[in-house]
Image: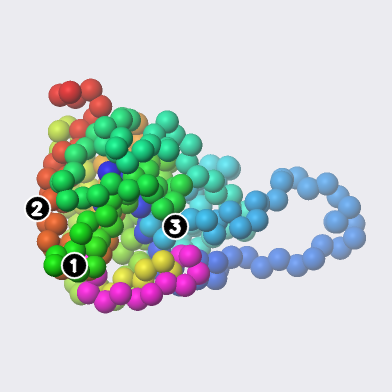
């Protein structure tokens, strides 16, 4: 399911462009001089979902600047990741690619809502309650930002937290898996120019280190729904394995 490691948001995102540098019109001489670098593609960064990991610029640095503050550089260019796994059908989630996993039968695999997501699952709420969503992301080897930068940004999507986030690390089938658990008031969709504060929400995240690069998983939803899938999430994490190992 690439809880993705969106394994898969991925800053305090009330206005991710608030710290972007301002620009002034050049004088006539400057305007006639050829540009040394092509301009950034307009509006590209606005296509990012709230839960995405930082995406590399063409220059090689991660878009998003300061992970906790959601700063964006003036020339950041963002495009959907190009990996062999992108465009998988829901029936293929966890069955192809360098990382494999399995999910409980109650988790419904759906077509990802964003091209940045590798996989997406909807987890039903109890007795008709509000569901939770697990998103997965994969950007290739060396991409997606550091473990801690992603965790800091995910925690930053909570305007209030009930307690200090809990981070742990475990070995799963020879893979190093980083986990985070945080509850509080979650700002849903803030990076998309709005968002609604949801009290009593919980996020469980997992980032898997593999030889092919990091996989990001992020589970978010009402505390009661996430708690109801506690055992399912644990079995999901325990199922991570590299392709070819024990198959």
Q: Residue at x 21, y 37 (%)?
A: 101
Please say if 100 is above or below 19.
Answer: above
Residue 210: % across, % down? 29, 34
How far across and down, in percent of the image, does residue 235 sit?
12, 45
The quadrant of the rendering that contains the C terminus is top left
Question: CA–CA distance between discs 1 and 3?
Answer: 26 Å
Marks 2 and 3: in contact by CB < 8 Å? no
SS category of the residue bearing label 2: helix
Nearer-the-camera pick, 135 or 32: 135
Q: Position of residue 17 (x, y in %)?
A: 55, 66
Find residue 124 and report its image quarter.
bottom left
- Can residue 21 be seen here? The reply is yes
Return the disc, 2 or 1, that comes first in the chain's sequence.
1
Q: Is residue 18 left or right of residue 103?
A: right
Q: Which residue position is annotated with label 3?
A: 49
Q: Which residues are magenta?
A: 191-204
Q: Name which residue lies at 58% across and 42% down.
A: 58
């Amino acid at each position: 399911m690439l809880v993705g490691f969106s394994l898969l948001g991925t800053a305090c995102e009330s206005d991710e462009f608030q710290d972007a540098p301002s620009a002034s019109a050049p004088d006539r001489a400057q305007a006639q001089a050829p540009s040394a670098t092509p301009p950034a593609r307009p509006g590209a960064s606005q296509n990012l979902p709230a839960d995405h990991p930082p995406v590399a610029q063409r220059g090689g640095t991660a878009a998003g600047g300061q992970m906790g503050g959601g700063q964006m550089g003036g020339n950041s260019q963002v495009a959907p990741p190009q990996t062999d796994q992108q465009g998988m059908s829901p029936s293929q989630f966890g069955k192809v690619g360098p990382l494999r996993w399995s999910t409980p039968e109650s988790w419904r695999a759906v077509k990802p809502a964003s091209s940045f997501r590798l996989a997406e699952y909807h987890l039903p709420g109890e007795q008709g309650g509000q569901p939770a969503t697990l998103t997965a992301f994969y950007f290739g080897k060396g991409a997606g930002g550091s473990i801690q930068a992603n965790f800091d940004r995910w925690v930053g999507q909570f305007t209030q937290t009930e307690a200090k986030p809990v981070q742990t690390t475990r070995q799963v089938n020879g893979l190093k898996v980083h986990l985070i658990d945080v509850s509080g008031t979650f700002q849903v969709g803030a990076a998309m120019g709005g968002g609604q504060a949801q009290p009593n929400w919980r996020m469980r995240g997992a980032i898997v280190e593999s030889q092919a690069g990091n996989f990001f998983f992020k589970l978010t939803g009402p505390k009661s729904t996430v708690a109801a899938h506690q055992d399912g999430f644990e079995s999901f994490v325990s199922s991570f394995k590299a392709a070819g190992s024990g198959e």
